[in-house]
Image (tube, rainbow, N blue to C red):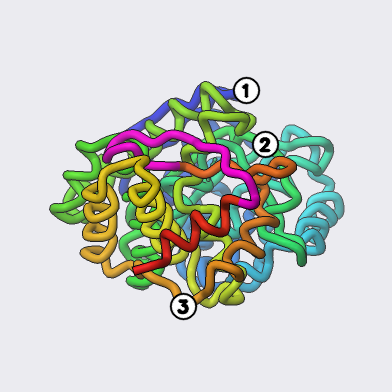
Amino acid sequence: MRKVNVCASKKYEVIIGKGLLGKAGEYAKAVVGTGKAAVITDDVVDSLYADILVASLENSGFTVVKMVLPNGEGIKTPENAFKIINFLAENRFTRSDTVFALGGGTVGDLAGFASSVFLRGIRLVQLPTTLLAAVDSSVGGKTAVNLPTGKNLAGSFYQPDLVLCDIDTLSSLPEGIFKDGCAEVIKYGVISSKTLFDTLKNGINNNLSDIIAECIQIKSDIVSLDEQDRGLRQLLNFGHTVGHAIERGTDFTVSHGGAVAVGMVIISKAAYKSGLCEKSVHDEIKELLTAYNLPVSTALTAELLLEHALSDKKREGGTISLVIPEYIGRAVTKKVSVDELESFIKSGLDN
Ligand code: GLY
């Protein structure tokens, strides 16, 4: 078992290991006490893991209610956030009761957002069941819902009280969902750790707990310095501006991890063509993503990518912050004007 401490506006532990769902009640009780527990999950995760979690919570003295939403990014709406809020109100939850977000990033973001708004904030335990949620969205306190105009456009910074990452849930994932998380893991190597990047060349499954803990430690270090995403934290968005544009431009038929993978390839190519890094940086990134069977190209045009990129949250007036890899293990942010962005993206698409 591995533990990572996060020191943001709230201090909490991320615990990573096998069989944690069955002990979730004990771990949660030690942090939030008992009381009412609302398990928020989706129908796929519900059939696999909710019973184990509910039994564990009940055995530790929680009174449990459960809300099950359909699986998929489509549930991350303001309407569903209010459904959860009303569910908590109808069950007379108070601020000493706790929401348990059991699922991937979609459930975590949605339930986290509802938790931050209900009674101006109630207790929250994140239980990620995908690799992507484990290494990224469950940690660091970003919560959000999507608007018709863009992804994650309404949200809050709201740190959980505890994150429990049960490795057993990750290994039962369909291959595509696991691969999605691998893109985010590779991202951590590029922006912060050559050692991690090189380790990933030997595969990920042999020391999954250690690799997840390393990613979370990198995220924790960044979030503790810039919780509100004013500068340093933007490094975590390497590949994401173009990635989000690809997700939207393909009506979300390309997954988040796949889109981020292509985004990393496009940006690193544009970066070397602009003299911001060596070509070998781009080549190494592309090679590792390819080894993980992640996509490395898109049929979308630069014009379309630009259109969607401009509704990205990282835009500030006439500029947008892009994350540029300087070498493997170090990235920097660079403000690019909206006018420059199209030609930058174009140079990343060109052969
Ligand atoms: N997913 C990027 C962040 O948490 O800042």
Does the residue at mark 2 contact the one at mark 1 (Cβ under 8 Å)? yes
Q: Which residue is mark 2?
A: 157
SS for dot 2 = strand
Residue 189 position within the rendered picture, expressed as x and y whole percent measured from the top left: 30, 42
Most prominent secondary structure in the magenta stretch?
A: strand
- 264, 181: nearer the viewer: 264
Residue 38 visible to the viewer: no
User: Dot 1 lies on which element?
Assistant: loop
Q: Position of residue 201 (x, y in %)?
A: 16, 52
Q: Are marks 3 and 1 in contact (CB under 8 Å)?
A: no
- Compared across the picture, whether 212 is left or right of 288 comes to right
Q: Amino acid at mark 3?
A: Ala
Q: In which image quadrant can residue 171 be found?
A: bottom left
Choose mark 3 or mark 2, whichever is in front: 3
Q: Determine the CA span between mark 3 and mark 1.
A: 42 Å
Which numbered tag is attached to residue 9? 1
Three-letter code for the amino acid on which mark 2 is drawn? Phe
Q: Nearer the viewer, residue 36 or 10?
A: 10
- State the CA–CA distance, disc 3 to disc 2: 34 Å
Which span of residues is magenta-colored?
Answer: 324-339
